Amino acid sequence: MSEVPETELPEGHSDPFRGRCAMLVSALAMVLAIAGLGGNNASKESTVNNILAANAYAFYQAKNIRQTEYKIAADNLQLQLAQDKLSPKAKELAEKKLADYQKNIARYESEPETGDGKKELMARAKELEHERDHALAQDPWFDYAEALLQIAIVLTSVAILTGVHALFWVPCGLGILGILSTINGFMLLV
């Protein structure tokens, strides 16, 4: 059995270039993790808010259909009352029923105490759409950041392996762009 000779690895601590590269990789990896988290959260928020907005619109439509049914029924009762062919007892019942229908029509239009009127549902749906659109605007910035940071990490590894000091500045520039994209993903400054 032959022994494999040990190869000496260069001392990493004595080379300041490798130390700078290692620090750069560490910083880029940290920002990459933050960008990944931000992108995942933005994606989830957009999906959840889209579902909630669709639910609010569906509830609005259901309320609109019920309200329309009450309007049709109220119109029919008004026609019957206008013909004046009802007995006094039937007229009284029809007027009471008409008042109930009109009360339900108004309640379906706006119900501030429960927030389930058409007016409140539409406002809620619009707000959820706004939150969805905000998350959708954030998401690409996190994608850009992740790509830039991953490329910067790879190029830093190439700089370490080749020992070419000039290569160090390319990942630095890409890293700065990745950091700025991450910040913009959270704040939407641009």
Image (cartoon, rainbow, N blue to C red):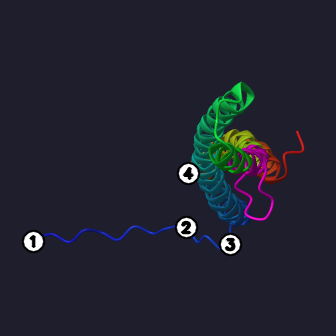
Residue 162 visible, this orientation? no
Do tag 3 and tag 4 residues touch (Cβ < 8 Å)? Answer: no
Task: State which quadrant residue 12 falls in.
Answer: bottom right
Residue at horizontal 49%, vertical 68%? 9
- Choose mark 3 or mark 4, whichever is in front: 4
Label at residue 161: 4
Residue range in magenta is 100-124
Query: Residue 90: horizontal and vertical position, in percent?
Result: 62, 44
Residue type at mark 2: give it: Pro
User: Is 80 above or below relative to 161?
Assistant: above
Q: Residue 1, labelled with which disc?
A: 1
Which numbered mark, 2 or 4, is in the foreground of this view? 4
Residue ID for mark 3? 14
Q: Earlier in the sequence, mark 3 or mark 4?
A: 3
Contact between marks 1 and 2 (CB within 8 A): the answer is no
Task: Identify the amino acid type marked 4.
Answer: Leu
Q: Quadrant of the C terminus?
A: top right
Q: Earlier in the sequence, mark 2 or mark 4?
A: 2
Residues under numbered marks 1 and 3 in contact, where contact means CB atoms less than 8 Å apart: no
* Secondary element type, mark 2: loop
Would residue 189 be visible to someone looking at this image?
yes
Residue at mark 2: 10
| Residue at image coords 66%, 40% | 67
